[in-house]
Image: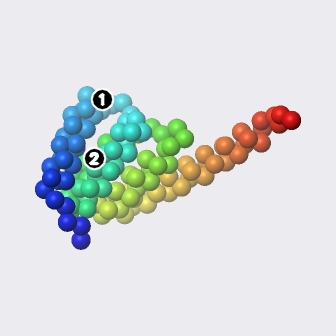
Amino acid sequence: MLNISWKAQLSGGLAAVALLCASNTAQAQSTDLTLAKQLADIAFGYAQAQQPEKAITLLGQAETYAGEDCFESIAWLKIGVAYQAAGDQAQGEKFLTRAAESAVERTASRARKVSASPVVA
């Protein structure tokens, strides 16, 4: 079992409070990629510290990330893993599937763009 020091718990808690305060002002807006990944990472820490309720609360905020960029599969992956660590296997699987589908779509999209570009000799 992971032994988390009080300093790590305190710094994680302070980061969570800062993120929660920042996100409360824009609750209706979607979360950006960086914030979604940070929230998922902090949630994973809470899950590992046997505090799944706090983890799931943060993951609910991370879920508001709209995606639609080239790194979205990373955010979905982090959210999925954190949900599974927090004990919510169904939500975890949903986001892991979303991550895989997003990665496949991005790869296919890049392949289409490359094949459509003119070859310069």
* Disc sitting over residue 82 in the figure: none
> Of label 2 and label 1, which has the lower sequence position?
1
Q: Residue furthest bottom?
A: 1
Tag 1: residue type? Ala
Callout 1: few (<14), some (14-19), or many (20+) C-alpha neighbours within 10 Å?
A: few
Q: Position of residue 78 (x, y in %)?
A: 40, 53
Residue position marked by numbered label 2 in the rendering:
58
Residue plotted at (21% across, 37% down): 18
The colour scheme used here is rainbow
Residue position marked by numbered label 1 in the rendering:
26
Residue plotted at (17% across, 43% down): 14
Instruction: Locate residue 15: give its quadrant.
Output: top left
Q: Secondary structure at mark 1?
A: loop
Q: Position of residue 49 (x, y in %)?
A: 21, 61
Q: Position of residue 48 (x, y in %)?
A: 25, 62
Residue plotted at (15% across, 49% down): 10
Q: Is residue 102 above or below residue 117?
A: below
Residue plotted at (63% across, 48% down): 107
Tag 2: residue type? Leu
Disc 2 to disc 1, how far (Cα)? 14 Å
Answer yes or no: is residue 64 visible. Answer: no
Query: Which image quarter is the N terminus in?
Result: bottom left
Callout 2: few (<14), some (14-19), or many (20+) C-alpha neighbours within 10 Å?
A: many
Looking at this view, is 17 or 25 the one in front? 17
Looking at this view, is 30 or 77 the one in front? 77
Looking at this view, is 48 or 53 the one in front? 48
